[in-house]
Image (spheres, grey):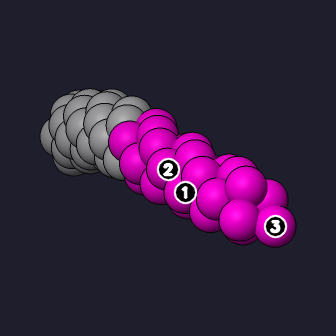
């Protein structure tokens, strides 16, 4: 009986260590994924702002020519 309880305790401890390691890896990969998402959003915003500035510049030149 004592052997079974000790085995169960060791098993529970190992399972808890594994769960902790899993949670740490999930957190690490989640943080990494978020960083990539934020970088992608930043690049998309920069491209959109550049395109909008170019469009405004082209419209201004068009109106100047028409005037």
Q: Nearer the viewer, mark 1 or mark 3?
A: 3
In the image, 34 versus 1, the foreground residue is 1
Q: CB atoms at circles 1 and 2 under 8 Å apart?
A: yes
Inter-mark Cα distance, 1 to 3: 18 Å
**Dividing the picture into quarters, in which one does residue 66 lie?**
top left
Identify the main secondary structure in magenta.
helix
Inter-mark Cα distance, 2 to 3: 24 Å
Q: In the image, is residue 13 part of the stretch drawn in magenta?
A: yes
**Can residue 54 be seen in this snapshot?**
yes
Range of magenta residues = 1-29
Q: Nearer the viewer, mark 2 or mark 3?
A: 3
Q: In this view, does 21 lie to the left or right of 46?
A: right
Residue at x 64%, y 59% (from the top left corner) = 6
Q: Is residue 41 left or right of residue 7?
A: left
Question: Residue tagged by mark 1?
Answer: 13
Question: Residue tagged by mark 2?
Answer: 17
Q: Which of pointers 2 and 3 lies earlier in the amino acid sequence?
A: 3
Question: Residue tagged by mark 3?
Answer: 1
> Where residue 45 sits: x, y (%)?
33, 45
Q: Nearer the viewer, mark 1 or mark 2?
A: 1
Element assignment for label 2:
helix
Residue at x 71%, y 65% (from the top left corner) = 2
Inter-mark Cα distance, 1 to 2: 6 Å
């Amino acid at each position: 009986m004592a052997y079974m309880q000790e085995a169960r305790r060791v098993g529970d401890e190992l399972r808890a260590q594994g769960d902790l390691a899993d949670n740490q890896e999930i957190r690490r990969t989640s943080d990494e994924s978020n960083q990539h998402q934020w970088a992608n959003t930043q690049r998309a915003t920069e491209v959109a702002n550049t395109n909008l500035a170019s469009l405004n510049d082209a419209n201004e030149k068009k109106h100047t020519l028409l005037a």
